Image (cartoon, coloured by chain):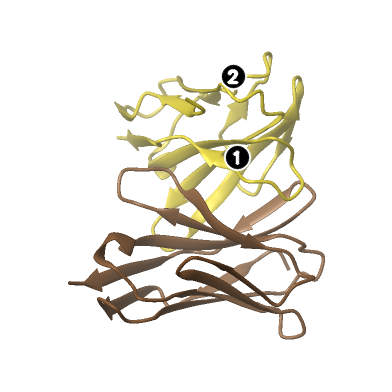
Chain colours: A yellow, B brown
Amino acid sequence: EAQVTQNPRYLITVTGKKLTVTCSQNMNHEYMSWYRQDPGLGLRQIYYSMNVEVTDKGDVPEGYKVSRKEKRNFPLILESPSPNQTSLYFCASSRQVLNTEAFFGQGTRLTVV
Amino acid sequence: QQQVKQSPQSLIVQKGGISIINCAYENTAFDYFPWYQQFPGKGPALLIAIRPDVSEKKEGRFTISFNKSAKQFSLHIMDSQPGDSATYFCAASYGQNFVFGPGTRLSVLP
């Protein structure tokens, strides 16, 4: 089954404790991205990757890091989480960046206290 | 320039009625306009998409109307069903730029 898998689904952590949210896709897609979803703001892009070892900032990259060492994996790293990073996070992948369907993971609900 | 505006924020429709959600954009470079549907606890999923060379696209009960000169596009859901109750996001993209609207929460009453 074609899918994008995120882990964990739910996470509660404390301010400053480094964490990683994993994302993996099995569709051999080149393009992957991370979004955060906040009430009234829709989905805002954090980082994206057009291929292995190629990453770039989206609209809200501050406080986040990503890496793309393998085509299928695109982890999101919060080196020092803060309460304003409490949000619902989605990973997405698509065959290519231009005008193609994006497939989303199930989401990770992160709470930073 | 990169923003996509969406209205209404929430919408309540009776079963069998027509649901209409509107979006507007500023950047004329956008060349792909998808609509995503999101159920609670799930990630968004592509519902229907349109490119600016056509004014309308229909897939079953779902229709996108596109007005290039007004820089507006809308989603029409005919014969709305309770199973259509979800949050709907319009989006616009060109190149690696992909922008979502803030979303519309649709509730279809039985």
Q: Residue furthest top?
A: A69
Q: Amino acid at mark 1?
A: Glu
Question: In this rendering, would A109 be left or right of A47?
Answer: left
Residue at (63, 57) in percent of width and height: B99
- Earlier along the polypeptide chain: callout 1 or callout 2? 1
Question: Which residue sits at x=41%, y=76%?
Answer: B78
Residue sitting at 56 percent across and 21 percent down? Answer: A26
Residue A71 location, quadrant: top right
Is residue B34 visible in the rendered structure shown here? Answer: no
Q: Which mark is residue A106?
A: none
Q: Is residue A11 left or right of residue A30?
A: left
Q: Residues within 10 Å of mark 2 (few under 14, many from 20)?
A: some
Q: Please name which of the two marks, 1 or 2, marks the residue nearer to the observer.
A: 2
| Callout 1 and callout 2 share a chain | yes
Q: Is residue A51 above or below residue A102?
A: above
Q: Position of residue A66 (x, y in %)?
A: 62, 26
- Chain of the residue that carries numbered disc 2 in the rendered image: A
Q: Residue furthest left?
A: B110
Compared to A59, does A85 lie above or below? above
Q: Residue furthest front?
A: B60
* Crowd around label 1: few <14 · some 14–19 · many ≥20 (10 Å): few
Identify the residue position indicated by label 2 in the image. A73
Left/right placement of residue A112 relative to residue A6 reads left
Residue A77 lies, in percent from the top left, at: 53, 24
Query: Could you tell me which quadrant the C terminus of chain A lies in?
Result: top left
Provide the residue designation for mark 1.
Answer: A62
Amino acid beneath label 2: Asn
Question: Which residue is at the front of the view, B25 or A46?
Answer: B25
What element does badge 1 sit on? loop
Percent x, y of residue A95: 69, 35
Chain to which mark 1 belongs: A
